[in-house]
Amino acid sequence: MSTIRLVAIRETALSVDEVLAAVTDPAAGGLVVFVGTVRDADGGKAVGGLGYSAHPAAEERMRMVAQSVAERFPAVALAAVHRVGDLSVGDLAVVVAAACPHRGEAFAAARALIDDLKETVPIWKHQLFADGTDEWVASP
C-alpha cells in the first residue's frame, strides 16, 4: 500500500473522519491531524467569507509535496485535502494528516506537509471582509 493515501482538491465540504480513516494504520504509533478553518477575523478586520481557487496543476503539485514529505520522514501514511470555492466562517479549508511509527515523527511530518503545501501549491485565497473590502492572500 502506498504511503500517500489521499490527496484531493474539492469543491465540497471536507471530512476530518475521511482523512483520519485514510491514514489509520496498525504500523503507526503516532497520528497527527491538522485542520485549517476559516476564521472570523484577520488583521483586526471582520471576515465575512472567502473563496479559494486553484491552478489546474494544484492537485498534482500537492501529490508531489506529499511524496517529498514521505521521502524525508518515516511516514507510514499521509493525506491532504484542500477545499476550493466559496467558504464561510467556520468551514474547513484544509485537512492534512501524517501517521508515523512515533508521535514526534508524526508531528514533524504533519507540520512539513501543511507548511510545504501552503508555500508551494498554487491555491489562492480571496478574502472578503465584512466592511466590503477584500484582499488576495497566500499566492505561492
Image (tube, grey):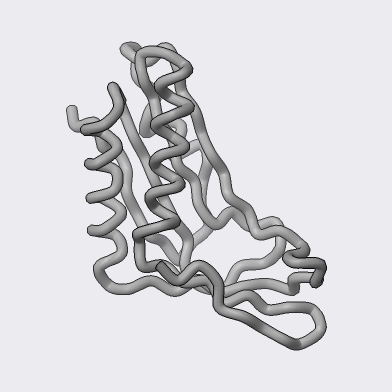
Query: Percent from the top left, x then y, of residue 97?
Result: 44, 35
- Reply above or below: 62 against 73: below
Residue at 80%, 71% (x, y): give it.
45
116 or 48: nearer the viewer? 116
Seen as rendered, the residue at the extreme left is: 1
Query: Percent from the top left, x then y, of residue 54?
Result: 38, 71
Query: Percent from the top left, x then y, of residue 96?
Result: 45, 42
Q: Is residue 122 left or right of residue 12?
A: left
Residue at 68%, 72% (x, y): give it.
49
Q: Is residue 29 left or right of residue 50?
A: left
Image quadrant for the N terminus?
Answer: top left
Seen as rendered, the residue at the extreme bottom is: 132
Residue at 55%, 72% (x, y): give it.
137
Image quadrant for the C terminus?
Answer: bottom left
Q: How many marks?
A: 0
Q: Is residue 133 left or right of residue 6?
A: right
- Reply above or below: 22 against 36: above
Q: Is residue 32 left or right of residue 61?
A: right
Query: Percent from the top left, x then y, of residue 22?
Result: 37, 33
Residue at 61%, 68% (x, y): give it.
87
